Image (spheres, rainbow, N blue to C red):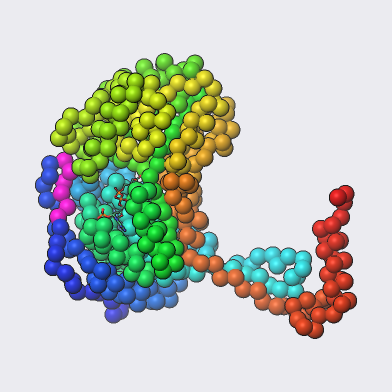
Amino acid sequence: MTSIETAPAETSAATFTSLNPANGEVVGTHPIHDAAHVQATVASVRKEAERWRALGFDGRKKALAAWRKVIAHRLDELASLMSRENGKPHGDALLEASLAIDHLAWAGSHAEKVLKRRMVSPGLLMVNQAATIEYRPLGVIGVIGPWNYPVFTPMGSIAYALAAGNGVVFKPSEFTPGIGEWLAATFKEAVGHGVFQVVTGYGETGAALTTSGVDKVAFTGSTATGKRVMAAAAATLTPVVIEAGGKDAMIVDADADIAEAVDSALWGACGNAGQTCAGVERVYVHDRVYDTFLEQLVTAAEKVKAEPGGQLGPITMPSQVEIIRRHIDDAIARGGRAVVGGPVPEGARYVQPTVLVDVPEDSAAIQEETFGPTVTVTRVKNMDEAIRLANGTPFALGSTVFAKDKGMEIAEQLRAGMTAINSVISFAGIPTLPFGGVGQSGFGRIHGADGLREFTYPHAIARQRFRPAIELTSFRRTDKAEQQLVKVIKGLYGRGKK
Ligand code: NDP
């Protein structure tokens, strides 16, 4: 490719550092991009997007495959950076990046099938028409990402938006800017194209991206910030995807495989130090197996340690420790008990796995997103009660069911964007499944065919093949034609008893 549009020159000399959350060491120094720089980047990407669109599905598929290859070759390097900047163990970083590559592969190779122009039925009344739909790219997508899954989460928007033919400007979290820059640098290296660029900085840079004239904002982050992004985007009628927080429940029925349910509950609650939007924060267990489940969970949780080199890394964002502490303290003050872990010591960077029982349903630990390695376990008398309680928060992102007989029946009654049966968070790794929430967890979808269409607009074309037998959309319409229409409609839709 020729004449690559390069990122605009820096308009601000201000910088900030990203720190290793395990020890506070500086990982990298990055520019704080101001509104002028953000606008210039969007303009540059918009120009590049024309050439990107012109590549067609096949050209983009090849380009994205080249990027995927570079990331796969340098997986270890990326995972090390992720460990340093986000704090997660190397193995967790490898898993996250691998899943992101899989999504990139799927998006690149399925965009044509999902989005290209296709025929649809014109219906009986319009049988003289040929009806087609094509999903066209919106233009430039502003992607605003969180720090907890700094590769997998933004890739859910970046890969799908690019595959659909858009340009992308990505603002990574202030805690993980180096990872964002790494992604853009490897894209440029592999593809030689400036259609995907990164801007760095604090919340103000994200706010500037929201109002920069992008054609859609794909936001992943907290519900509170999501509301601010949506309010700002409303001023220019810029559409938004909001992937916000969660308070996911797991339900364990009496016939569940308890050992598997325990393993999944623990990993779902504590993996990534509990900083997972679709992590397990609450478990509702059938009375008949509650004691066995809890006993096994306690035994398993006591073996998992949050420490340097341990299975759990530190809490990435220092201010989150205070929220986790408040939820645990509140649960205990209101009659709950910590059967593993307990109050978080002052100054802690690491939070140990914490299992809370007897926690009132209206407490913060049940109703608000904790985002730490904590889980509440609650006894229920039957699955109706489990479903009612699982559905009892304003959030509705993911959910989990462990059951032999009634897994599907229970899953279908959960108010959630996704449900895993007899495994945990599996839906996120399946590229064909859409990912997203309802209620306070947001709206819109990444991943799958829905995730590709999220970054497009449908263009409908009706092509007349021959003049209609009954001419209706013309001032030449006659009384006879109207009577014929009435006859057809009554014949088609008015038959049978009233
Ligand atoms: P935040 O809401 O704090 O930040 C998200 C992003 O928004 C960051 O890049 C942030 O920049 C930026 N931002 C902050 N203020 C503004 C603003 N006014 N306008 C535009 N952008 C802004 O979330 P976290 O980074 O703390 O991420 C954790 C949250 O993300 C959790 O609630 C989690 O549940 C959710 N999440 C949801 C997922 C989903 O798919 N549903 C997946 C992963 C996480 P900066 O960091 O520089 O302040």
- 398 lies above or below 298: below
Residue 63 rendering spot, x and y as whole percentages = 37, 66
Using the image as rendered, state which of residue 184 and residue 98 is in the foreground. Answer: 184
Residue visible at 45% across and 72% down in the picture? 56
Question: Left or right: where does residue 228 sit relative to residue 310?
Answer: right
The quarter of the picture where residue 459 lies is: bottom right
In the depicted structure, whether residue 376 falls above or below residue 38: above
Residue 19 on the magenta segment: yes
Residue 186 seen in render:
no
Query: Which span is picked out in magenta?
Result: 17-22
Q: Taking 486 as reference, is 103 left or right?
A: left
Estimate the x, y position of residue 302 in percent, counting from the top left. 27, 22
Residue furthest left in the image: 25
Q: In the visual, does 296 lie left or right of 381? A: left
Image coordinates of residue 140 in percent, x first then y, are 38, 69
Depth check: give the residue in front, 445 or 370. 370
Q: Quadrant of residue 40?
A: bottom left
Quadrant for residue 37, please give it.
bottom left
> Which residue appears at 37% of the width and 71% of the height?
213
Q: Is residue 235 magenta?
A: no
Please give the name of the residue rendered at 15% of the width and 35% of the height, measured from the top-left corner: 347
User: How many discs mark residues in the rendered view?
Assistant: 0
Could you tell me if residue 319 is visible in this image? yes
Q: Specify the farthest residue to the bottom.
A: 476
Q: Would residue 306 be found to the left or right of residue 117 on screen?
A: left
Q: Residue at x 38, y 76 (%)?
A: 51
**In which quadrant will I find the N terminus?**
bottom left
